[in-house]
Amino acid sequence: MENTGYGWVCDATSGKPIDGLYVAETNQEHGMVAAASGTPPFATLPIGARVRVLPNHVCMMAAPYAQYHVIEGGDAVVAVWDKATGW
């Protein structure tokens, strides 16, 4: 996919990217989805539809959480990291 914006829009169940859709803008708790060409498929993704987003920057994923569960090559948690605050 060419356009990544703030991340790729994916199917909520399978996690597979939906061809050509990406997060074009973000504002606090919401974002704007755009299509690389044409209009987003509103018939299959009406307003309120759930999707997953594969973000291209860690801040969007990391900021809301106090701790991070670390895995290595599987599903087992091998460590828990506390959130660092400040710079």
Image (tube, rainbow, N blue to C red):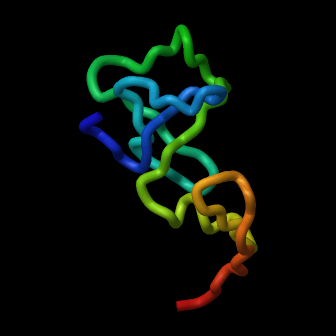
Image height check: is 11 above or below 77?
A: above
* Farthest bottom residue in view: 87
Return the x and y of residue 70 as percentages of the image width and height.
66, 67
Image height check: is 6 above or below 83?
A: above
Return the x and y of residue 13 as percentages of the image width and height.
65, 27
Q: Which quarter of the picture shows residue 56?
A: bottom left
Return the x and y of residue 21 as percentages of the image width and height.
40, 29
* Farthest top residue in view: 43
Task: Please give left or right for residue 21 compared with residue 47 in the image.
Answer: left
Q: Which quarter of the picture shows residue 34?
A: top left
Image height check: is 40 above or below 16?
A: above
Give me the residue at 59% from left, 46% from top: 30
Along the line of sight, the residue nearer the viewer: 2 or 28: 2
Give me the residue at 60% from left, 62% from top: 72
Along the line of sight, the residue nearer the viewer: 39 or 62: 62
Give me the residue at 74% from left, 72% from top: 67
Along the line of sight, the residue nearer the viewer: 67 or 32: 67
Task: Please give left or right for residue 52 compared with residue 82 in the image.
Answer: left
Image height check: is 5 above or below 73?
A: above
Return the x and y of residue 50 as percentages of the image width and height.
66, 29
Q: Which quarter of the picture shows residue 39?
A: top left
* Figure disc tally: 0
Task: Please give left or right for residue 1 compared with residue 41 in the image.
Answer: left
Give me the residue at 53% from left, 8% from top: 43
